[in-house]
Image (cartoon, rainbow, N blue to C red):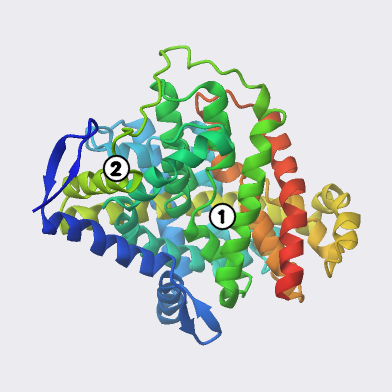
Amino acid sequence: MNHTPNRSGHDGPTFTSADYMKFIIPSLIGILFFIVPIPSGDGFTIPVAYLSNWLIDLIGDFVPTIAVIMMGISVVGSLITYAVKPAFILERPHMNTLFNVTPFWFVMRVIGFIAGVMTLLVIGPEAITSEATGGLLLYELIPILFATFLFAGILLPLLLNFGLLEYVGTMFINVMRPVFRLPGRASLDALASWVGDASIGILLTTRQYEEGYYTKREASIIATTFSVVSITFTIVILSYMKLDAYFPQYYGTIILAGMVAALIMPRIYPLSRKPDTAYEKTELKPEEPVPSNVPMRTWALRQALLKSKSSKGAVATFKDGFQNVLDMWLGILPVVMAVGTIALVIAEHTSLFTILGKPFEPILMLLQVPEAEAAAQTMVVGFADMFLPAVLGSGIESELTRFVIACVSVTQLIFMSEVGGLLLGSKLPISFFDLVLIFLMRTIITLPIIVGIAHLIF
């Protein structure tokens, strides 16, 4: 038998060898699939990306049709929920979350489905169905998303459900307050975003804000600084930019640039001006410290073992994973198709993004980024959707420039198709103007860092 001390330093729960294995084995498998690079035909990739590419090679021709069907299910399910309010949906938390959406997100699902059908059947305006707009999304980006969501969604519980998050998060408690001016528990929100999804981090932050664990300032900082796009999405972007061989350098660059932004953003407007007061409908709860007579590693291990001990079996874990897949297939695919098509039509048939991106052209030229003119518009289009910089920049010849675009699109963090929409729909004190300002400031802060590293790599 093994045991670790409880909060007061006395003996706490007793953990068996099986409990340790339940924490260690799934966590190591999760790290292997999501973090450890493996050799591939083009250099190195991670196992999740390798499996995704294998599936695309196997059934790639059928994926656009399957994806449009998924978009249709998303629309029909939402319509039935709104019109009929069936008990079998409303009384099931997962189905209720999946289909009981706001009018704005329902409209986005409808637009995405219509764009998908038009592109698949090649009907309607060519501006929507052409290879440069809807066709680019449906036949190139959507298959990558579809396959990556499948494997990443199923395997994510290995990282989330067996204590790894609690262990690593607890180990970072003493970093968050002095460095980022945040409670230690914020490290869990950040980790949930990085290994899960930005929406998971935002939901965790919002819930804890409403329960009194964060002030308005703290919640705003966490949601706009640490709710970064997940490893899953970074894989998608890198694969689309044909830079899979550079994953370690890519992810390391994102971490470094993101950390610099996280150090600066809480100390400047608008985040620094948010009040340090609790949510109006609750009282502020003080942060619970790690017991002084318990070593940090011991406490972290205890928290991890408590989580793994309470986790469910293999069937429940697979069910959680499958629900993750449905969330991404039905919730994200139609929104990406909608926002992506609209933005690509604007990009192809108007000069809006070119005009908005013009101020970045001399900056990119000063930083000696090749094909600066083509890259400039990608610096602003990411505000609409995180994938669009990769979509618009994938045709650029310079690997250095594609690398810069891929990194910047992630470190910008704010994109309206998911993170921005969630923040505006939450109870957090964040306005649309705040989001625009934060997006631009993060771009200005991270761009020189990313370009500097890119020049060292290429």
Q: Does 414 sit left or right of 102 as displayed?
A: right
Residue 74 left/right relative to 399: left
Which residue is label 2 attached to?
299
Which quadrant of the structure image shows residue 38? bottom left
Rendered view: 300 above or below 409:
above
**What residue sits 24% from the left and 37% below the top?**
92
Q: Quadrant of residue 451?
A: bottom right
237 or 40, which is in the foreground? 40
Residue that appears at 71% across and 59% down: 450
Q: Residue 188: percent from the left, percent from the top? A: 41, 42
Q: Amino acid at mark 2?
A: Trp
Give the mark toward the camera: 1 or 2. 2
Q: Mark 2 falls on what kind of element?
A: helix
Tell me where residue 99 appears, x and y as whole percent. Answer: 37, 40
Q: Residues within 10 Å of mark 1 (few under 14, many from 20)?
A: many
Q: For mark 1, what is the residue?
A: 337
Mark 1: amino acid: Met
Question: Which element is circle 1 on?
Answer: helix
Left or right side of 430 for 40: left
Q: Quadrant of the C terminus?
A: bottom right
| Above or below for 174 versus 269 | below
Sequence-wise, the earlier of marks 1 and 2 is 2
Tell me if residue 44 comes above or below residue 8 in the rendering. below
**Residue located 37% across and 69% down the image:** 32
Q: CA distance from mark 1 to mark 2?
A: 45 Å
Mark seen at residue 9: none
Q: Can residue 392 be spotted in the picture?
A: no
Q: Residues within 10 Å of mark 2 (few under 14, many from 20)?
A: many
149 displayed left or right of 270 = left
Residue drawn at x 53%, y 48% is: 335
